[in-house]
Image (cartoon, grey):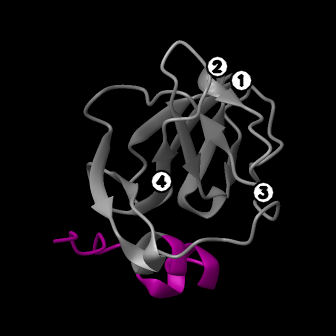
């Protein structure tokens, strides 16, 4: 069961797409996310609760249309849930801190993990290592 939104974060604080993705388990259109082509060094956080999820050095261009990573910042950062929606069998990934929907993980990524964490930009907030600038997906 998903946690409630933090008291200081309501539907009006999220864009329609951010709410749809993180709270309704939706998917943004491919190749539309603000962080898809981001190549800066830094940390990708959960947009809802700001928990760190992925480091920029694990991001790569998979060509799938969504930001892709080969590993999370820690084993405890991500929650994995079997997803049988849309007639497919997939593994949904959520923020383990607040249960925000992030995307899915697939076993077709690069080494060293062989995994592709396919993440909606709309579920992420990026913090640049050099200047601390934040960019919402």
The earlier-in-sequence mark between 3 and 1 is 3
The earlier-in-sequence mark between 4 and 3 is 3
Residue 79 located left or right of residue 43: left
Which residue is under mark 1? 41
Q: CA distance from mark 4 to mark 2?
A: 19 Å
Which residue is under mark 3? 34
> Which numbered mark, 4 or 3, is in the foreground of this view?
4
Q: How far across and down, in percent of the image, does residue 64 sit?
A: 74, 50
Answer whether residue 90 is magenta in the image: no
Q: Which of the 4 image quarters holds residue 56? A: top right
Task: Report the residue at 73% width, 72% height from top.
Answer: 29
Task: Report the residue at 75% width, 60% height from top.
Answer: 33
Task: Tell me the crowding category of disc 2: few under 14, some 14 to 19, or many 20 or more residues within 10 angstroms, Cα based.
Answer: some
Considering only vertical position in the picture, is 135 above or below 113?
Answer: below
Provide the residue span drawn in magenta. 1-21
* Dot 2: element: helix
Asked if one can make out residue 103 in the rendered structure from this viewpoint, the answer is yes
Residue 77 located left or right of residue 71: left
Task: Report the residue at 82% width, 60% height from top.
Answer: 31
């Amino acid at each position: 069961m998903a946690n409630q939104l933090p008291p200081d974060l309501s539907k009006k604080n999220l864009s329609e797409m951010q709410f749809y993705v993180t709270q309704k388990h939706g998917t943004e259109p491919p190749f539309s996310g603000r962080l898809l082509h981001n190549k800066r060094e830094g940390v990708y956080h959960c947009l809802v609760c700001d928990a760190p999820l992925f480091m920029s050095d694990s991001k790569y261009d998979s060509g799938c249309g969504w930001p892709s990573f080969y590993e999370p910042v820690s084993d405890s950062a991500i929650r994995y849930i079997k997803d049988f929606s849309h007639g497919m069998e997939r593994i949904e990934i959520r923020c383990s801190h607040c249960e925000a929907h992030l995307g899915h993980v697939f076993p077709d990524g690069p080494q060293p993990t062989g995994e592709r964490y396919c993440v909606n930009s709309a579920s992420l907030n990026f913090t640049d290592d050099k200047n601390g600038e934040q960019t919402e997906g």
